């Protein structure tokens, strides 16, 4: 859905929210890059089209982005987190045209939570950019819980923190969360986290359990020819290829950096034009004041 598909009242709120944050957005290339036409719609929708709530939420995200700088996280910084293929953006979209964020908890290979979270945020940035470019605006989260255990389960504190990041800084991004073969152990974490999850988000979470219906459930949402056999698909082996994914992420990083540089150059050019106008106005004002002074002296 584009802005033109909104009601007149909704379009008015979008313009109002855009104007509300314009002063701070205008000062930072990274915020200009983040605030596209869909950003304002997502934050308003996340807060039920309540302008004041959406404004507070968006301002908090802008402050977070200036402080955390997710746009500066590069693949080489988080590459070690992805060696096992525990979290990555899948090579194809789901049947709704959404990018797929693929997660395998059993492949947890590190213990440094700060870096794990940076890897998560980098993945969300990649998926969000793809979602905007495709027009879907949202992504699908596909979680393979085969082999899930206490040894690879994240601490509850980390789960809550990740949920907070998703809810507060990536609103209206989740199109679907598909939990494949979630074990009883996960239900404990789910029960603890569930009260903190938005009711609308809960409706987007589906569980695919073992049984006669699982293939049909997966086929309804994903291309089985592009899904691994261990998840009911037809693809042999592992879909994750570290070298190919590294190449894709280098392309992503380069595109983000080039876009930021273009925005900085544009802002610098606009500032220069503004300074020229101010200088010209000052010169005209000075000439007029000088002429007025000559008149007074002559009299």
Image (tube, rainbow, N blue to C red):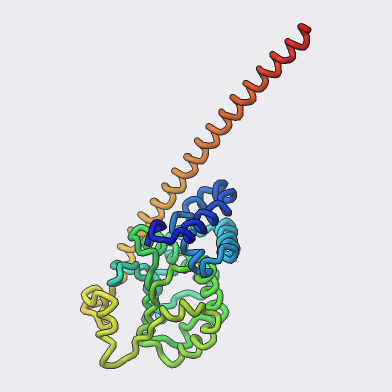
Is residue 107 rendered to the left or right of residue 44?
left
Which residue: 48% across, 83% down?
153
Q: Quadrant of residue 17?
A: bottom right
Is residue 248 rendered to the left or right of residue 166?
left
Which residue: 51% across, 88% down?
191
Where is residue 182 shown, x and y percent of the image? 39, 87
Q: Quadrant of residue 106?
A: bottom left
Q: Nearer the viewer, residue 118 or 56?
A: 56
Where is residue 244 shown, x and y percent of the image? 30, 62
Which residue: 49% across, 43% down?
264
Which residue: 35% across, 57% down?
133
Where is residue 135 shown, x and y percent of the image? 34, 60
Q: Quadrant of residue 130?
A: bottom left
Judge whether 247 appears above or below 227 on screen.
above
Where is residue 8 shown, x and y percent of the image? 45, 58
- Residue 295 seen in the current view: yes
| Quarter in which the N terminus is drawn | bottom left
- Residue 83 seen in the current view: no
Q: How many marks?
A: 0
Judge whether 3 appears above or below 147 on screen.
above
| Quarter in which the C terminus is drawn | top right
Which residue appears farthest toward the front when viewing the image? 8
Q: Nearer the viewer, residue 235 or 111?
A: 235
């Amino acid at each position: 859905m584009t802005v033109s598909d909104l009601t007149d009242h909704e379009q008015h709120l979008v313009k109002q929210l855009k104007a509300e944050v314009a002063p701070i957005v205008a000062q930072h290339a990274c915020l200009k890059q983040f605030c596209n036409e869909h950003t304002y719609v997502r934050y308003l929708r996340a807060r039920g089209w309540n302008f004041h709530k959406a404004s507070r939420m968006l301002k908090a995200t802008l402050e977070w982005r200036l402080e955390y700088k997710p746009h500066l996280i590069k693949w080489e910084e988080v590459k070690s987190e992805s060696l096992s293929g525990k979290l990555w953006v899948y090579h194809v979209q789901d049947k709704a045209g959404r990018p797929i964020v693929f997660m395998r908890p059993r492949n947890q290979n590190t213990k440094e939570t700060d870096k794990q979270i940076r890897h998560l945020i980098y993945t969300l940035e990649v998926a969000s950019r793809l979602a905007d470019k495709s027009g879907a605006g949202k992504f699908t989260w596909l979680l393979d819980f085969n082999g899930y255990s206490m040894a690879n389960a994240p601490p509850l504190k980390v789960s809550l923190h990740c949920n907070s990041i998703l809810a507060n800084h990536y609103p209206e991004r989740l199109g679907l969360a598909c939990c494949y073969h979630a074990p009883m152990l996960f239900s404990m974490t789910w029960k603890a986290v569930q009260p903190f999850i938005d009711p609308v988000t809960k409706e987007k979470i589906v569980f695919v359990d073992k049984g006669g219906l699982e293939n049909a459930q997966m086929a309804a949402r994903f291309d089985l020819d592009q899904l691994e056999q261990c998840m009911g698909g037809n693809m042999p082996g592992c879909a994750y290829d570290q070298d190919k994914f590294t190449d894709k992420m280098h392309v992503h990083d380069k595109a983000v950096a080039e876009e930021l540089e273009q925005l900085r150059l544009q802002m610098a050019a606009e500032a220069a034009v503004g300074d020229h106008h101010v200088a010209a106005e000052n010169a005209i004002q000075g000439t007029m004041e000088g002429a007025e002074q000559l008149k007074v002296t002559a009299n």
